[in-house]
Amino acid sequence: MNAPAKNDDFAQKPAAIPDGVYAETVLAVEHYTDRLFRFRMTRPAGYRFRSGEFAMIGLMVGEKPIYRAYSIASPAWDEELEFFSIKVPDGPLTSHLQKIKPGDTVLMRKKPTGTLVLDALTPGKRLYMFSTGTGIAPFASLIRDPETYEKFDEVILTHTCREVAELKYGFGLMEEIRNHEFLAEIVGDKLKHYPTVTREDYPFQGRITDLIENGKMFTDLGVPPLDPAIDRGMICGSSAMLKDTKELLEKAGLTEGANNKPAEFVIERAFVG
Ligand code: A2P
């Protein structure tokens, strides 16, 4: 018979958006590799966050919302929200999220949070942002925030990926800043980008931890070794990367801070792996 089964009938109705969350509209999607993409969406009126914080982002999958923590990659002043995401083929959220198109709805819980914020650091001169993979996302926010350059004379963004193609988002950010009508002047030559690759030939090669330990990062950047009196750090990557980088900063005499106890460095896991 041609009559649809009762279940099909039911599935065709759009699932109701849960109470108490924002339902925002996707504005743009850009795919970088088969593992990485970014999207921009509308920002709810009155939604406030500090650059570097993360939000819970979700989609209705069938009748149920599925959420994951995502660093907000856009700065606090931006009218839109940007996110940088991995695509996991069988990931509960990213297998669906990677298919979004402009006009689609993305859910966001109301409260942003996180430790990769300028307030969690004591005053210093040079700010290192150590990232691997999608761990660059919170720094995409912070390097586009004028407050970062009010607080620091020099900002060094390190980004390590397995392959060269995965560095593209970071290069795009640098270009955007250079061409931006007001950021270009505020940032000037304070921001240095240090991209490295671990599984392909590239002028800058190796894990950031190795490049700190053997001193090559400092030589390449033309900066002195880590100094707890002036250097500050933020770390975002996999759990193993956080642990290893944190150990190196502690060895150099820096201590870990938090929102309620600012110190010389802060860490946050790059959530969706
Ligand atoms: P490698 O290729 O040597 O594993 P992933 O996608 O696995 O999160 O890795 C992203 C990047 O982070 C890769 O370049 C990877 O290097 C590097 N990486 C992985 N684990 C660590 C670690 N414990 N310390 C520093 N870098 C790491």
Image (tube, rainbow, N blue to C red):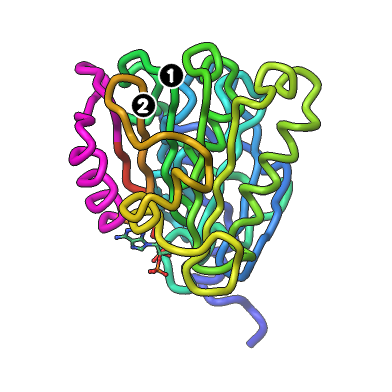
Q: Quadrant of ligand 1?
A: bottom left
Q: Which residue is mark 1?
A: 125
Task: Locate residue 61 relative to residue 26 in the image: left or right.
Answer: left
Local secondary structure at mark 2? strand
Q: In the image, what residue type sits under mark 2?
A: Asp
Name the spot of residue 140 as percent of width and height, x first: 56, 37
Local secondary structure at mark 1? loop
Residue at mark 1: C-beta within 8 A of ligand 1: no
Name the spot of residue 98 as percent of width and height, x first: 58, 61
Residue 252 appears in the figure: yes
Task: Locate residue 113 relative to residue 72 in the image: left or right.
Answer: left
The quadrant of the rendering that contains the N terminus is bottom right
Q: In the image, what residue type sits under mark 1?
A: Lys
Residue numbers of the magenta segment: 239-266
Residue drawn at the location 43% of the way across and 19% of the way down? 125
Residue drawn at the location 20% of the way across and 32% of the way down? 253
Task: Locate residue 91 relative to residue 192 in the image: left or right.
Answer: left
At label 2, counting other C-alpha atoms closer than 10 Å, the crowd grade (few under 14, some 14-19, many 20 or more) is many
**Image quadrant in which you'd find residue 113:** top left
Residue drawn at the location 30% of the way across and 38% of the way down? 267
Circle number at residue 81: none
Location of residue 138 with respect to 39 vertically, above or below: above
Does the magenta run of residues contain 26? no
Q: Are marks 2 and 1 in contact (CB under 8 Å)?
A: yes
**Image quadrant in which you'd find residue 34:** bottom right
**Image quadrant in which you'd find residue 120:** top left
In terms of sequence position, does the residue under pointer 2 or pointer 1 come before the other? Answer: 1
Name the spot of residue 116 as percent of width and height, x first: 37, 31
How many dots with numbers?
2
The quadrant of the rendering that contains the C terminus is bottom left
Residue drawn at the location 51% of the way across and 35% of the way down? 156
Circle number at residue 231: 2
